[in-house]
């Protein structure tokens, strides 16, 4: 028996419009708090776009004409979303899970790290740098660390939304239009599972994320239909 039962797990098979996804999350957060709707983890991809979190700096947007840019209420700076990147939006009752935001963020980090373990990839966190990182030096590569997953969160009345993004096989050149998460130091960049030489599919990543979520969040998962019809615009 796990601590939290009947968390819904939904996967959209085609890219979903960003604004429609955010509007849905806002409604679901309200319904979880006011109407007792089930918690939800929603896995999807977006068309290529940039998002500006609440700490975004104007200078970190290098090419505003490259893709649509959306201001968003999540924490953090600029990030990229696009095909080949698994976005996982988490609509969870943080009040019922202890009202400890730092612990909740640590669990999100641990979720990604545990999923990466399935592919023998050592994900790590770094003080002062948000997200999950891979030390390329340990893989026999150059002296550098690359970000493989981003974390951006918002809480409303102690219900979370937004979440994580894991780079499975995105076009890494698309990150060139921004300074990802404000990280610009030499020796730091972005990577993906496929960039690391691993033939990982999106289904593989989803399976690893699902298994890791159960382990880290002590939650039973119930498969559910994706919240929105798929959209490509």
Image: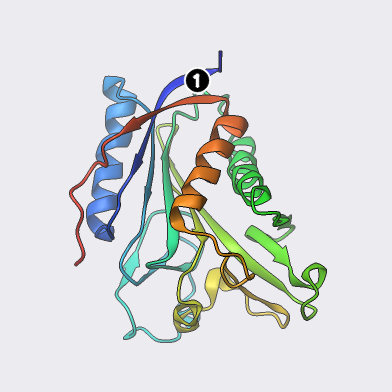
**Left or right: where does residue 13 sit relative to residue 112?**
left
Task: Return the x and y of residue 42 as percentages of the image width and height.
Answer: 37, 43
**Left or right: where does residue 37 sit relative to residue 124?**
left
SS at mark 1? strand
Quadrant (top left, top right, bottom left, bottom right) of the N terminus: top right
Task: Return the x and y of residue 19 as percentages of the image width and height.
Answer: 25, 58
- Is residue 53 visible in the rendered image? The answer is no
Write down the quadrant of residue 104 in the picture.
Answer: top right
Tell me which residue sits at (64%, 70%) in the image.
Answer: 196
- Is residue 32 visible in the rendered image? The answer is yes
Task: Return the x and y of residue 80 as percentages of the image width and height.
Answer: 44, 69
Tell me which residue sits at (24%, 48%) in the image.
Answer: 23
Write down the quadrant of residue 37 in the picture.
Answer: top left
Q: Which of 145/116 is in front?
A: 116
Is residue 35 shown above or below 12?
above
Q: Which of 108/34 is in front?
A: 108
Disc 1 designates what residue?
A: 4
Is residue 183 shown above or below 5?
below
Alpha-carbon neighbours of circle 1 within 10 Å: few (<14), some, or many (≥20)?
some
Q: Which of 157/39 is in front?
A: 39
Is residue 175 shown above or below 215?
below
Applied colour scheme: rainbow
Tell me which residue sits at (64%, 36%) in the image.
Answer: 103
Task: Return the x and y of residue 82 as percentages of the image width and height.
Answer: 38, 68
């Amino acid at each position: 028996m796990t601590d939290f039962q009947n968390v819904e797990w939904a996967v959209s098979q085609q890219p979903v419009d960003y604004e429609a996804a955010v509007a849905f999350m806002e409604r679901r957060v309200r319904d979880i708090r006011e109407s007792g709707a089930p918690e939800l983890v929603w896995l999807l991809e977006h068309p290529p776009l940039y998002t500006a979190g609440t700490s975004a700096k104007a200078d970190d947007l290098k090419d505003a004409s490259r893709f649509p840019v959306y201001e968003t209420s999540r924490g953090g700076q600029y990030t990229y979303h696009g095909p080949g990147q698994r976005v996982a939006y988490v609509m969870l009752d943080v009040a019922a899970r202890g009202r400890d935001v730092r612990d909740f963020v640590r669990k999100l980090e641990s979720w990604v790290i545990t999923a990466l373990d399935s592919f023998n990839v050592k994900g790590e966190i770094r003080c002062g740098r948000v997200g999950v990182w891979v030390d390329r030096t340990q893989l026999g590569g150059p002296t550098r660390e690359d970000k493989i997953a981003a974390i951006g969160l918002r809480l409303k009345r102690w219900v979370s939304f937004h979440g994580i993004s894991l780079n499975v096989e995105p076009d890494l050149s698309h990150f060139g239009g921004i300074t990802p998460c404000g990280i610009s130091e030499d020796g730091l960049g972005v990577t993906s599972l496929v960039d690391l030489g691993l033939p990982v599919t999106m289904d593989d990543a989803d399976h690893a994320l699902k298994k890791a979520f159960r382990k880290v969040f002590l939650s039973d998962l119930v498969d559910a239909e994706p919240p929105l019809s798929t959209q490509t615009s």
